[in-house]
Image: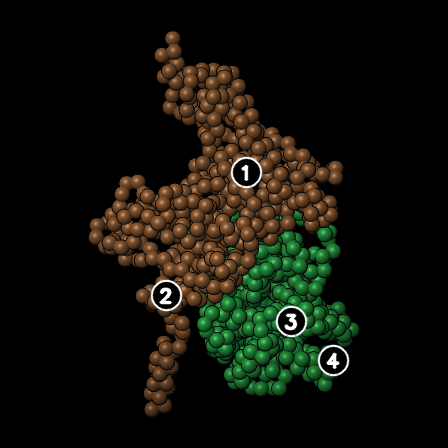
Amino acid sequence: MNKLNRKAMFLFFIMISTVFISGCWSQKELNELAIISAMAIDKNEDGKYVKTIQFVNPGNVAGGLQGGGGGQGPAVTVYTATGDTILEAHINASAKVSRRLYHAHANLLVISEEVAREEGIDGIIDAFERDPEVRTESKIVIARDAKAGDIVKSLTSIDKVPSEKVNKTLLVTERARGENIVVSIQDFISVSASLGREPVISGFRIKGEPEKGKKMENVQQSELDATLEASGLAVFKEEKLIDWYEGDLAKGTMWILDKIQQTDVKVSWKGKKNAVVYNVIRQKTNVSADTKNTYPEMTIHVRAEGDIRELTTPVDITDPAVISDLEKEIEKEIKKQLEKAVTRTQKNNSDIFGFGEVVHRTDPEKWKKMKRDWDDEYFPYVNVNVKVDAFIRRTGLRTNSFHSNTEK
Amino acid sequence: MEKAKISAYQLFVLIVLFELGSAMLIPLAIEAKQDAWLAILIGMAAGFCLFLVYYSLYAYYPDTPPTDYAQKIMGTVLGRMIAFLYVLYFVYLSARVVRDFGEMLVIVFYPETPLFIMNALMVLVAVYTVRKGIEVLARTGELLFVLVSLLAISGLFLIVVAGIIEISNLQPVLEEGMKPVIKTAFTQTLYFPFGEIVVFMMILPYLNQPKKAKRTGLLALGISGVTLALIMALNTSVLGVATVERSLFPLLSTIQAIEVAGFLERLDVSFMVASVIGGFFKITLFFYVSVAGTASLFKIKEPTQLAYPLGVVILLLSMMIASNFTEHLQEGVDIVPLYVHFPFQVMIPVILLIIAFFKKGKQNDQAINK
């Protein structure tokens, strides 16, 4: 009897524990969640934050290509809400959404240029960093010449979820062109918190008409009415946006930040512009500081390797002497880009290159005196030497260009 | 003392899991900024000395727990007082660790679950384990140590592969000279986590090969010290000092930063598994020695009977010791090391050792080797 009792008790406890330890305390089924894919922050005329939240419509994302499944509606739905703080706007959004807002899959935060220029973005970021549900690996971009809300409202093709499209575009263009940088919330915070460095964030703009971008018709044509496009680097100083870098300036900045993976360098040959296009395959940039004098002296050393990928004029690239001359031209061109970026940045008094951090590492003692007014008192007067070593390794499948033959 | 024996390997595993327990979660030694790893290593070296003190006491009395030999050394009255204080100390630390882990789980993973439930569940598991005795705990340790090691190795591998390490974040080394590093080592890391090995004074008598105690203890301390230093170096190099300083659980942020091949990401769960395992051992070991100490002090025949009442005490204490997490952390950094750890980890053991030396003379290893 006693034995039976014990068995019964044991069974009873096992059954009870299925209720208590299965972790259903705050269980949420998938159909109770509204999965956020991107968020955008604007400000309205009353000075309140406008938070635009992009939700994934799971049924409409899946399977266009696999046949069936994919619904007719747009892949995302967007709601906006206002509030004095980010959190308030977020909570207010719940009045419009039938499900619990679920952050863990959000991977994009868009901030409007206006907000970034006028009040800076440090105040916005804290709410995102503090919340354990938000991923600090989410990427940040600045909406350029557009409302941040419009960026997340635009429908996109190929990648149907716009936040995916923005993230992937950033990643691809950072790799291939090197004028944009992928910055996550975490990256932004760690740079922003450092005294010896100021952040840069990529810009995104809408090419076309934002109003048409919201309609399904936008993605039902070969050329979209509104396309999201990576555009420029937003330069910050003391948490506020102060400048946009594009083209050579952006590239020069990316070189110094050692973020270039691949990019093209056009050089002229015998007076002809853009005669040779050099494609960088890999590079390494080192920045070092010499702190003997009052103003530190920085040396940027670039070592690039790459191929010749395009000849617009006949150049005899079978001749090693020509190759080494070309290398010199390429070095000059890269050096020009870097110097351009340095000059402009020193004018901006904003050390986006992290020279301050290098000085800090090299000479901690001197840095202590400089760190408080590094950006305004020291950084603009730093002497910067640029040294570039470029190597042409290969020339593609062909040696000389076919127009070498037609020349005669 | 229960009749149980553990092997040297089991002791090793218990020490490592215990040392890593809560220390790997927090920004350990961050007062030393980017030199935190160095402060940890120095703390570890000093921890070796402390362990040798405990070991020497053990060598004098290889078969009795300190709650007993304190009475032999200091006389019954004073010895009992000391033993009682030690029991309180262990109970308090156990409650602190319960609180640490309860808060961690609530902050990171279960924001809507009350802290009490978290703490109660953990204490419940600890009570169950303590009732089963030290041998079961040691075997559990052997099993879970493999899991934790696998997580650690794969975690390290993924962090390296993800390419998120910025060695320059660790520079400049010794920016402010040695002073802040030494200060951090001797005001923080020495006591937490290395000095906490004092609980193993109560576990050492269970060792089946007393000869191996010294080597095992030092090796385990060394491995956990190097691991902790590596963890802090990784945290700093991945996140930067500024972020680590502001993080409650920097290791979590480091793991979240891993993104490999587009799908090996959001590995938070491995952090949770490793930390809960470590926390379980830390709580249970503190809890176990509280029970064992109480039993030997009050001559209770069945120590396991104490598990439930002491469990309730620890649970309630864990809820009461601080009204919010900020207060709990502040106590842990400012008050506990100096006013609680220092007397119990350094002062009392050293005094006991000196008196024991005069009483028993230089017979150190003989007792063990005979």
- Name chain B's colour: green
- Distance between the Cα atoms at labels 3 and 1? 46 Å
Q: Chain of mark 1?
A: A
- Label 1 vs 2, first from the N-terminus: 2
Helix or strand or loop: what does disc 1 sit on?
A: helix
Q: On the image, numbered disc 2 is attached to which residue?
A: A96
- Disc 1 marks a residue whose amino acid type is Thr
Task: Measure how far apart labels 4 and 3 are at the Cα level.
Answer: 31 Å
Tell me how far mark 1 sits from mark 2, CA to CA. Answer: 43 Å
Q: For numbered disc 4, what is the local secondary structure?
A: helix
- Type of amino acid at the residue the image marks with label 3: Glu
Q: Secondary structure at mark 3?
A: helix
Is residue A272 positioned above or below A305 on the image? above
Is residue B57 in sight in this rendering? no
Quadrant including the C terminus of chain A = top left
SS class, disc 2: loop
Q: Residues within 10 Å of mark 3 (few under 14, many from 20)?
A: some
Circle 1 residues within 10 Å: few <14, some 14–19, many ≥20: many
Any mark on residue A64, and which? none
Q: Quadrant of the N terminus of chain A?
A: bottom left
Q: Chain of mark 4?
A: B
Q: Which chain is brown?
A: A
| CA distance separating discs 1 and 4 | 71 Å
Q: Percent x, y for residue A10?
A: 37, 82
Q: Are marks 1 and 4 on the same chain?
A: no
* Residue corresponding to mark 3: B331
Relative placement, left or right, of A391 versus B51 is left
- Label 2 is placed on what type of residue? Lys
Residue at image mark 1? A253
Residue found 36% across the figure and 65% down from its top: A97
The residue at which mark 4 appears reads as B74
Does the CB distance between marks 3 and 2 fall below 8 Å? no
